[in-house]
């Protein structure tokens, strides 16, 4: 028997490579000599620590918690106004929070998918910035030139359950045409009322998404949604692309080459696509994954910087003439990879001969490595995952989740919760550790 101690190999997960990569201009977008850069790199990040609000350190929060945090900032403010513009299916108020009194209307909406909270946190920080730093020259320019409307957490019923869909079971971002959801109706009504020149559609994407064909994780994906199947670039889209050029320059010093372009297949049911069709230059922002950032607090900061750089450039017009090269040069969003591959172990199941099989585990909470279920079982040599756990020479005993015991009838099954113990012996006595939907703390620490 192979008695060598278990061995854990962890391959680069999202963001690790970024630590080593130097800040720089996006490929193909270096400003020509002499032309002023539309972005003062670091200007917004320098302000961030002063204005970041406390109380949203866990990315899973309900509307009540969000409002407790945001209300403390916006209540009694002379600069920020709050209007309840409707109710969710379960009667939670949906608020339009606005600042600035300039001639150019801009609309940002976040968390139409209830479990995508990164930008909602950044919006709270932006309210705090407006309240605390109104004398800052850049903030003043925004307040004078723009009227900024925001709907933080468009889907509070989904947020209550931390799920994508609303209480009706509908994906609000596939309801722009049918308008069967109260939340979708509210977004449409607000858009028609304020007629924004620019719209920001703020989401999170799978943390396993890669940059193009590389092994790098995608921290931020951007898109100018097409307005029809031709995917042609009209003035409305070109404006969005130029503003994204500014956002890329502002965010690249923070996330390096971990910015991607989201897929641009036209979807006639999606809000980003139809809002573009209705004449608003729409920018989709998808926050992905970042190393050592399980609560997306770093990506929250990146959102803050990217959105503020965008608002400033709209306020001053500095995006004009930036062109769409930086946006077009972004690598496409790559494949989504699984969360964890477990290789090399021998599976022990009562009534079956022992057998060798790899296991793919996908987590319900990928950033916390919790709530794992088996996604595939067998020869997975070509399958990619963010992490690998090599268990050569060890035995895996599937366990019953409720009892956490091995018992007759316990099987390995795709879709089942990933519970098993790992031992040096086929009888499973004296397990080295137990995988309870995720690796135990001592293994997480060893990484
Ligand atoms: Zn989404």
Image (cartoon, helix red, strand yellow):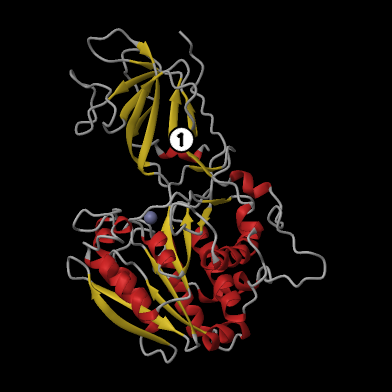
Q: Position of residue 196 (x, y in %)?
A: 44, 76
Residue drawn at x 54%, y 40% as measured from the top left: 13
Q: Nearer the viewer, residue 117 or 167?
A: 167
Q: Position of residue 214 (x, y in %)?
A: 59, 38
Mark 1 surroundings: few (<14), some (14-19) or many (≥20) residues within 10 A = few
25 w.r.t. 195: above or below: above
Residue drawn at x 39%, y 29% as measured from the top left: 360
Q: Position of residue 328 (x, y in %)?
A: 61, 54
Instruction: Determine whether the beta carbon of the residue marked 1 sits less than 8 angstroms from the nearest atom of ligand 1.
Output: no
445 w.r.t. 79: above or below: above
* Number of numbered callouts drawn: 1
Q: Position of residue 362 (x, y in %)?
A: 37, 36
Q: Residue furthest right?
A: 33
User: What residue is disc 1 on?
Assistant: 443
Q: Secondary structure at mark 1?
A: helix
Residue drawn at x 60%, y 66% as measured from the top left: 242
65 w.r.t. 17: above or below: below
Does residue 53 show up? no
Q: Residue furthest front?
A: 230
């Amino acid at each position: 028997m192979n008695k060598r101690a278990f061995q854990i190999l962890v391959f680069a997960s999202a963001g690790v490579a970024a630590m080593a990569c130097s800040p720089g201009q996006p490929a193909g977008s270096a400003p020509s000599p002499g032309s002023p850069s539309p972005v003062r790199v670091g200007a917004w990040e320098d302000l961030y620590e002063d204005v970041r609000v406390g109380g949203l350190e866990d990315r899973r929060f309900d509307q009540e918690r969000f409002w407790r945090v945001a209300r403390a900032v916006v209540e009694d403010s002379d600069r920020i106004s709050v209007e309840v513009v409707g109710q969710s299916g379960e009667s939670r108020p949906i608020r339009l929070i606005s600042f600035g009194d300039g001639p150019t209307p801009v609309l940002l909406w976040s968390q139409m998918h209830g479990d995508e909270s990164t930008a909602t946190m950044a919006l709270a920080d932006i309210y705090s910035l407006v309240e605390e730093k109104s004398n800052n020259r850049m903030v003043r320019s925004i307040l004078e030139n723009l009227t900024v409307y925001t709907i933080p957490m468009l889907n509070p019923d989904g947020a209550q359950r931390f799920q994508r869909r609303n209480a009706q079971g509908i994906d609000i971002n596939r309801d722009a045409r049918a308008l069967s959801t109260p939340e979708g109706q509210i977004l449409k009504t607000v858009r028609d009322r304020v007629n924004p020149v620019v719209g920001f559609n703020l989401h999170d994407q799978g943390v396993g998404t890669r940059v193009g064909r590389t092994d790098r994780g995608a921290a931020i994906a951007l898109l100018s949604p097409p307005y029809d199947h031709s995917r042609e670039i009209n003035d409305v889209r070109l404006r969005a692309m130029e503003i994204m050029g500014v956002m890329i320059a502002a965010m690249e010093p923070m996330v390096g080459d971990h910015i991607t372009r989201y897929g641009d297949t036209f979807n006639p049911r999606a809000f980003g696509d139809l809002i573009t069709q209705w004449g608003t230059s729409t920018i989709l922002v998808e926050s992905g994954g970042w190393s050592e950032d399980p609560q997306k607090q770093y990506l929250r900061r990146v959102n803050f910087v990217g959105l503020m750089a965008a608002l400033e450039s709209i306020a001053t017009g500095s995006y004009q003439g930036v062109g769409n090269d930086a946006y077009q040069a972004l690598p496409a969003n790559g494949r989504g990879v699984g969360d964890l591959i477990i290789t090399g172990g021998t599976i022990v199941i009562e009534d079956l001969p022992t057998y060798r099989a790899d296991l793919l585990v996908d987590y319900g909470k990928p950033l916390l490595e919790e709530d794992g279920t088996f996604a595939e079982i067998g020869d997975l040599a070509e399958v990619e995952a963010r992490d690998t756990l090599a268990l050569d020479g060890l035995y895996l005993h599937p366990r019953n989740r409720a009892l956490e015991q091995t018992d007759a009838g316990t099987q390995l099954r795709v879709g089942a919760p990933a519970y098993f113990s790992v031992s040096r012996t086929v009888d499973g006595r004296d397990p080295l550790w137990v995988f309870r939907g995720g690796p135990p703390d001592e293994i997480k620490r060893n990484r």
